Amino acid sequence: MNALAGQRVVVAGLGRFGGNIAAARWLVEQGARVLVTDAQPVEKLAESVKQLDGLPIEYRLGQQREEDFTSADLVVASPAIMPRHPLLAAARGAGVNVTTEIRLFIERCPATILGVTGTKGKSTATAMLGRMLRRRYNVFVGGNIGSSLLPELPRIGKTDLVVLELSSYMLHYLREMHWSPHIAVVTFLATDHVEWHGSREQYIEAKKTIVQFQRPDDFVVVNEECPACREFASLSHGRVMMYGIEGRKPLELKVPGRHNQLNAQAALAAANILDISWQDAQEALRDFPGLPHRLQLVHQEDGVSYYNDSIATIPEAAAAALESFPAKKVIQIVGGYDSHAPMTALCAALVERAKAALCIGQTGPMLAAMMGQSPHNAAAAVYECGDLATAVKVAKQIAAPGDVVLLSTGCKSFDQFVNFEERGETFARLVRGAHI
């Protein structure tokens, strides 16, 4: 008998982008009595609600009541909701189990699971790994990339493979399960999502979940160039596999950047464990175009190439994007929401390697001031543009054939956009000449 049948389940947080839509639909299919609740009003959630049309779901939108949480049999929380949220605390206090969509899936998944995490690089490494493994196996890819795999459970068998991109939010909630994947891949670690976790230490602690509960017959694949990643390896009971670029045969890639070669080497090291050869890996990536918003070529005009790297929401990622192209050929758009990340190294890299830095958003004036103080003889030109539309206009005025206009801000987008996807899509429309 299905344990969820007849249970009263509260789906907490539907979101404007429907993070819990698949979970709500799946719960209904299991026979649960589902209440969807979200602090945002119905008009802001109209698109998400529309996707659940016709299902026997109760809604409480624009308000959230403690009694809904404390009287439930189960709460399925959006990973975007901070675990210390008072309503989740009230549910736990009343003895109600709080879970997430990814945990519901992992608890029921019969297949071998590979997990990929990291501050940056995890989406691309996950996609590359999925492509490589499909040369020999039946593979499902999901987690923080693509759509929920809950609806795929009836099709997933014991001999299949599942590759999950696991965010720090997901890993925080998975910690209670004392679960780690059979093969864990750690790409790169820096500081991020401090607002959600409360501190850098708590962010790293959540990430450690991917290795801490591994068994001796498991594997951890870590970036040898990242000291924090090597530290993670010591926490695993499994076999440690290092990857890097030095001394390794490179894979030919369509996507630019040394960091993408590192992502490919991460995927290759994990795939090797499951007997995927270098040749198979190369064939799998030969036509891999990259993922949206990750050094994505979105336009070419008059000899100028325009790249959308809106995913670069930390300074380390923006510096890596700059390094992907020849020195003094990059006109880079930087700045955005101020999450108080240290920007000194990024500014130094821009001054030395960029042709120009176009500063936007909340941190724009600060970045322009920092770069303006440089004594470097061939320092990048610095423009304080304010917003993205102005930055694109300036970029088109100063770009010459052979130049790259790069949206790689090193900052989050919340000051002027809903998220990094909206920022990247806006950039693509602007460079193609569309009116916003």
Image (spheres, helix red, strand yellow):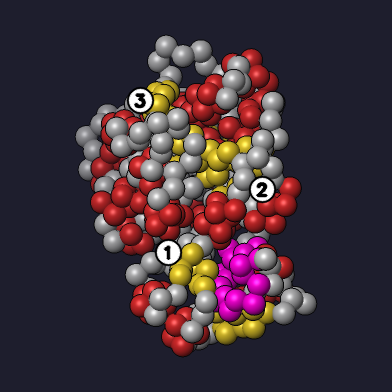
First-in-chain label (3 vs 1) = 3
Q: Residue at x 40, y 76 (%)?
A: 95
Q: Position of residue 422 (x, y in %)?
A: 57, 58
In the rendered image, which residue does mark 2 sit on?
Answer: 432
Classed neighbour count for the residue bearing mark 3: other residues with Cα under 10 Å, few (<14), some (14–19), many (≥20): some
Q: Residue at x 72, y 79 (%)?
A: 56
In screen coordinates, is 127 left or right of 175? right
Q: Secondary structure at mark 3?
A: loop
Of the two numbered discs 3 and 2 in the rendering, the one whose residue sits closer to the viewer: 3
User: What residue span does the magenta drawing correspond to?
Assistant: 2-24
Q: Main secondary structure of the magenta part?
A: loop
In the rendered image, which residue does mark 1 sit on?
Answer: 415
Instruction: Please tell me whether residue 11 belongs to the stretch shown in magenta.
Output: yes
Residue type, mark 3 in image = Glu
Q: Secondary structure at mark 1?
A: loop
Residue 107 position (above or below residue 327):
below
In the rendered image, which residue does mark 3 sit on?
Answer: 224
Residue type, mark 1 in image = Asp
Q: Position of residue 280 (x, y in %)?
A: 65, 19
